[in-house]
Image (spheres, rainbow, N blue to C red):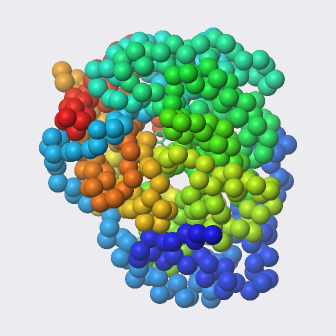
Amino acid sequence: MQRAKRAPGLPGDLWKAAFSALEPSSRVRLNAYSPSFPVVGSRCDGFYLPDCRNLVLSSLFSADGTVSPSMRRRELMKSAAAGLLVTTASDAAPILSTELKFPTDFAWGVSTSALQIEGSLAADGRGPSIWDNVNGGVSRSPPEPAASHYRLWHEDIRLLQMLGVSAYRYSIAWPRLFPKASAPLNEAGLAFYDRLTDAVLSVGVEPWVCLHHWDLPEWVQQQGGWIRRDTVERFLEYARTVVRRLGDRVRHWIPLNEPNIVAYAGYGAGVWPPKLMNEEFFFDAVHHQNLAIGRLCRELRQPGWQVGPVLALGPIRPASGDARDVAAAELQRLVLEDAFLGPILLGHYPEALKIRMAPLLADGDLGTIHRAADFIGINYYGPMYRRAWPGAPFSNDGNVKLEGSPVTDGKIVIDPEGLGEILRLLRDHYDNPPVVITENGAAFDENVQDAQIQDQNRIAYLRAHLQVANRELSTGSNLRGYFVWTLLDDWEWTSGYDLKYGLVHVNFETGDRRPKSSFDWYSSTIRSARD
Ligand code: FCB
């Protein structure tokens, strides 16, 4: 069996070392109840435990938060960590769009997702999703009207045509098709995507259909959501319905968007729906989503089709050279990256998680997941910085502010070289699978009073990332496409309407659309790169 190799210069065996350094009794404590880690805010009655079992990598820290003896050896890692920190934001020199050359069959696209743009939540029999009321009811940034795409989709098809993309990644809303438990297919919901797909094709754009982008039907969550293995079956039933209808036209499929963030933020850290904070649930959600991906990719295997998952990937770096922060970052990488890339590309869970995952594995699961996908989609925005926080989920504080680094409005550190790191990680350590950058973009506020909305900072961001992508492609990365996030200003989850990512400005009251300067820039970039 192939072994995961680590990125050069990273403290690769740190966790393995930490685990083996623990006394057997401490290893038992890895499954112990941690009173400092309570379950909060369950929306899934009957599926949370009265206590919370915890991976308790925080047991590497003593109660007062000081480092345990087993951590001392990690002092050695300090210098490595300090080395990592120098690779933060870089000032990529602006380049002319005409300098970018990509293969002729490279997919040039934009991505959107159903709940973020559609609105019309009560139209045509749609049911509720777990995200509908995340911001607390109608007055506080609900995904209604979002960008009114359900009503104005014709205009958006025209925009795709003007933009000149070759590919459009959009998602299907599961709650529009299956609004209630045991309800039959809601034909009106599916008919919308049928028309939309025809329209996408009619302007010469290739549809890339994402089957599930976070908007899990409320009824699926009430049955346990991704905690339950059965949800894989529910997902497959839904997915097959879509594929039966659109499969005569759609050749590119994405089973799930960012299952790593869903598992982490939704089930482990409890910050996003379904707001469960429980490390056991996290591992359930990891495996069941990996299985859903593997099963669907295998079912959809046929000549000319491309099926692959999309993961949120970015370098995960310690916030300081302190050994505890180094460990927190490494743990984060284990759960956000290795727990997905391991089974999907190497056929096994990372060593440090094997005991944890074993009870979840049925015969054949790993074989089903391993190399089932035709490509790996990467959503890249920027690197993540982690600081140790004993007692917090996964012992880490993700809310790290780095002084002096350029950031977007979403407080994401701008670091195009981080994209290069991820592309090289996949190239050098995972046997160079076909990869597609399925999301890349930046939120910036712009002056919408100007006749032409000048979003030069977005152009600079996109240009710098494309430049890195182009360089990695020419040095052997198996990169097949690039999708900007996103076509329209939209509803950005817990940030509501505050973060503007669109190439097109949307007036949320009237639905009016106005292409920004970045729209023109991307359009001419695509044209010249394809010439
Ligand atoms: C990604 C999500 C996408 C969008 C961007 C900004 O993580 O997949 O829906 O919100 O972030």
Looking at the picture, how far across and down is residue 105, in whole percent? 33, 38
Image side of residue 469 versus residue 182, left or right: left
Quadrant location, the N terminus: bottom right
Looking at the picture, how far across and down is residue 519, in whole percent? 26, 29
At a point 62% along the width and 78% down the height, the residue shown is 16
Which of the 4 quarters of the picture holds residue 245? top right
**Residue at the front extreme?**
303
Image side of residue 228 versus residue 384, left or right: right
At a point 38% along the width and 24% down the height, the residue shown is 205
Looking at the picture, how far across and down is residue 342, in whole percent? 59, 61
Q: Nearer the viewer, residue 111 or 65?
A: 111
Which of the 4 quarters of the picture holds residue 169? top left
Quadrant location, the C terminus: top left
At a point 27% along the width and 55% down the height, the residue shown is 474
Residue 408 in sight from this viewpoint: yes
Image side of residue 108 versus residue 16, left or right: left
At a point 70% along the width and 57% down the height, the residue shown is 366
Which of the 4 quarters of the picture holds residue 73? bottom right
Residue 388 in sight from this viewpoint: no
Query: Up-down: is 503 above or below 264?
Result: above
Q: Nearer the viewer, residue 109 or 380?
A: 109
Q: Nearer the viewer, residue 473 or 14?
A: 473
Query: Up-down: is 192 above or below 218?
Result: above
Query: Up-down: is 93 above or below 502?
Result: below
